[in-house]
Image (cartoon, coloured by chain):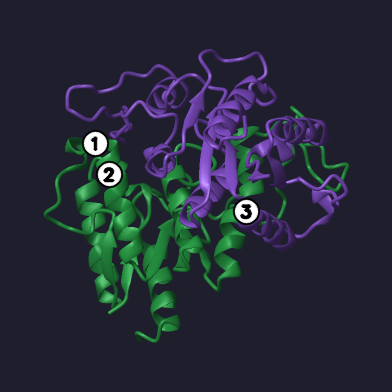
Chain colours: A green, B purple
């Protein structure tokens, strides 16, 4: 059974235990065995661990995993949780299979326009759009910064994106389950 | 001469060419040879490259580098540029030496409180502070999400932080130069 690292910011949720437990249950139902974070139901609560212990536990779980499925739904801003992004880069460099999903349907450039610049005028006169502060806006239609999407695509992974924003993007698991289904198919598990 | 990958979001600046040129000049003055991004003065402008070409150029530059010095100054929000975070994780997993610097003096938990929650009341009653939406706030005193700081520290790197916010955090290079100086000392270049 392939091992899977379920990267994502769920650990910050007030109901982290329940949401992460449901993610592990779904992963197992598609034929994967979760390695972390939070894959061990009996582990010490994060609040009791030092930053160093959390890092080492996560790195160990990444190294033990065959596959990563990362939640890159925007977290406290326009982009994915930075801890999750670190893990995507780390696991791609290790040669693992890395996929991602997001509950936000808009691409990164759209979110920079709508959320960061809040509807301010964007200079579209050159080949590279710029905000009113002159900063360039990535315009590649990707789910997040192109290093994330292209890193995943370069190794044959997929970024599975929601078609519409769900009522509760931090907890919605429909796209997570769809990504698991596609990943299980590709891994020959179904 | 050790090769260095100067990760950071400077490519988005309106004066990207000048700022990146100055970063390369400083890196060379401390004994490093930059590999990218933007290490080649004669390269095609990013606006003319596909996302795939940009990714492959950056990955190639990362693999050619001995060392990474990443700018993790917050970019469009409370955390580092996600492309830079991807590159930190990627290069640590490749076994490269990775350092970072930030022009923001506050730790990540402080920025979540002041910038994301904008002074709203934080529940400090448990061992784990939570915002008014119930989401936990990392409280480890690190410059950014602990995966970034601890990943760097675990391999003997350093995160060099500004003592005060400069007037122009996107362009200020004093802490960059200080990080180069410390890194050059550790590498025996000076």
* Residue tagged 2: A54
Q: What crowding class fits label 1: few (fewer than 14 Cα within 10 Å), some (14-19), or many (20 or more)?
A: few
CA gap, disc 3 to disc 1? 30 Å
CA gap, disc 2 to disc 1? 6 Å
For the question of whether residue B119 can be seen, the reply is yes
Q: Is residue B169 above or below residue B10?
A: above
Q: Residue at x 42, y 58 (%)?
A: A70
Residue A11, horizontal then vertical, whole percent: 29, 46
Q: Is residue B54 above or below residue B101?
A: below
Circles 2 and 1: CB distance less than 8 Å? yes
Q: Which mark is residue B62?
A: 3
CA gap, disc 3 to disc 2? 27 Å
**Between residues A111 and A84, which one lies in front from this camera angle?**
A84
Secondary element type, mark 2:
helix
Residue A61, horizontal then vertical, whole percent: 30, 59
Q: Which mark is residue A75?
A: none
Residue A66, horizontal then vertical, whole percent: 37, 71
Q: Residue at x 40, y 22 (%)?
A: B110
Both on one chain, marks 3 and 2?
A: no
Q: Residue at x 29, y 40 (%)?
A: A52
Where the C terminus of chain B falls, by quadrant?
A: top right
| Chain at tag 3 | B
């Amino acid at each position: 059974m392939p091992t899977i690292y379920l990267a994502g910011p769920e650990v910050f949720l007030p109901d982290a235990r329940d949401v992460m437990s449901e993610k592990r249950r779904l992963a197992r139902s598609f034929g994967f065995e979760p390695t972390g974070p939070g894959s061990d139901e009996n582990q010490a609560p994060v609040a009791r661990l030092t930053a160093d212990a959390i890092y080492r536990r996560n790195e160990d779980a990444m190294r033990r995993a065959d596959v990563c499925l990362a939640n890159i739904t925007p977290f406290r801003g326009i982009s994915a949780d930075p801890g999750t992004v670190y893990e995507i880069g780390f696991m791609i460099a290790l040669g693992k299979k890395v996929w991602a999903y997001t509950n936000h349907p808009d691409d990164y450039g759209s979110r920079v326009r709508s959320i960061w610049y809040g509807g301010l005028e964007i200079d579209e006169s050159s080949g590279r759009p710029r905000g009113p502060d002159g900063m360039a806006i990535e315009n590649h239609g990707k789910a997040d910064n192109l290093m994330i999407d292209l890193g995943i695509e370069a190794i044959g992974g997929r970024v599975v994106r929601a078609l519409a924003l769900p009522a509760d993007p931090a907890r919605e698991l429909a796209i997570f389950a769809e990504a698991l289904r596609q990943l299980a198919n590709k891994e020959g598990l179904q």
